[in-house]
Image (spheres, rainbow, N blue to C red):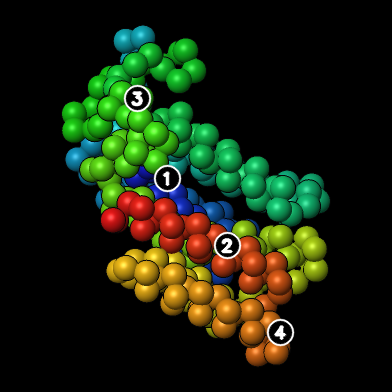
Amino acid sequence: MEIFWRLLLGHIIADFTLQTNFIAGWKRRSKWGLFVHCAIHPIIYSLLLWQYLSLVWIRIGSLELTGCTCVFLVFVTHVIEDEWRIWSVLKQGAPDDTFFYVWDQLIHYAIIFAFSPVVDGMQGKFGLFYYPPIPGVVSHWEGMGLGLGEAFRTISKNETWVFVALLFAAVTHFTTVTIYFIEKDLFGVPFPSTREKYISMLERLAVTVCFLLPGIWWAAVAGVWIIRSILYKLYRWGDFSWIHILLGNGIAILCGIIIRNLVY
C-alpha cells in the first residue's frame, strides 16, 4: 500500500503542516483561498508519487485511470468536501466542533483509500473497481502468518521514511489541531497563537525524538522531558491544560515507540 501511505502523508502535510493560520482563514473568506489550499494537495501528492503517476491505478471496465487522473479526482473531491464543510459552518450554522473535524478527516481518508491501488492487484476494495498490480510495491501476502508488528515491518520495509515522516507530521501540526478542537469544545479556548503552537509542537517533537536515542538513554531522557512538562503545569510555568499535556505527550510517546520500532 505504498501509494496509499504516500497519499496519506501528502494529505497530512498539505492539510495540516502547510495550512497556516492565514490560509485556514483565507479559505473561509474567499473561493481563491479554498482553491489555493486544495491545490497544494496535488502538488505534494505529485512530488511524493512521481514515479507512479503514469501507471494505471484503477480499472472500471474498459476505463483506465492513471495516477495523474486519480490525484486530480482526489483534488476535486477535496474541494467539494471542504466547500461543503465551510458552507455548513458559515451558512447553515453547523457546529465546527471535534465531531465535524473528525468526520471531515475521515471523508478525506476514505477518498484517498478509494483512489489508491491495492498492493497486489486483487479485485477492488468495493467490488466495483479493479486495481492492477503496480511494479515495485510490496505485496501484503509477504506479511501473512506473521505477528502484527513483524507483518507491519515486512510490508513497510521499503517505505520506512514515509512512515517516519507521517508520524512526525502527526505528532506536530496534526496533534496541535486535534487538541485545539477538543479544548475548544470543552473550554471554549481560541486557536493557539503562533508562539504557543510552535512551542507545544517542539515539546512533543522532543519527546518523540528521544525514542531514537541508542540503548536505554531514550527512556531516561523522555522521562525527564515528560516530568518537565508536568512541572510546567503544576507550577504554572506554561498555559497548557492537562488535556494538552497528557494527550500531547501520549501521542508523542506512541509515535516515538512506532518510529523506534521502524528504525531499529
Identify the residue shown where x is 54% and y is 60%: 251
Residue 1, image x and y in percent? 34, 34
Pointers 2 and 3 in contact (CB under 8 A)? Answer: no
Q: Which residue is mark 1?
A: 8
| Residue drawn 32% across the image and 68% down it | 215
Q: Earlier in the sequence, mark 2 or mark 1?
A: 1
Residue 70 seen in the figure: no
Say if mark 4 contacts mark 1, CB within 8 Å: no
**Mark 1 or 3, nearer chain start:** 1
Closer to the chain start, of discs 2 and 4, is 4
Q: Amino acid at mark 3?
A: Met
**Proximity of marks 1 and 3: CB atoms separated by less than 8 Å:** no
Residue under pointer 4: 234
Per the image, label 4 sits on a secondary structure element best described as helix
Q: CA distance from mark 2 to mark 4?
A: 18 Å
The kind of secondary structure element at disc 1 is helix
The residue to which callout 3 is attached is 144
Which residue: 44% across, 49% down? 11
What residue does disc 2 label?
250
Q: Which amino acid, mark 2?
A: Gly
| Circle 2 Cα neighbour tier, 10 Å, few/some/many (<14 / 14–19 / ≥20) | some
Which sits in the foreground, 27 or 65?
Answer: 65
User: Label 2 to label 3, Cα distance in Å?
Assistant: 30 Å
How far apart are labels 4 and 1 at the CA level? 37 Å
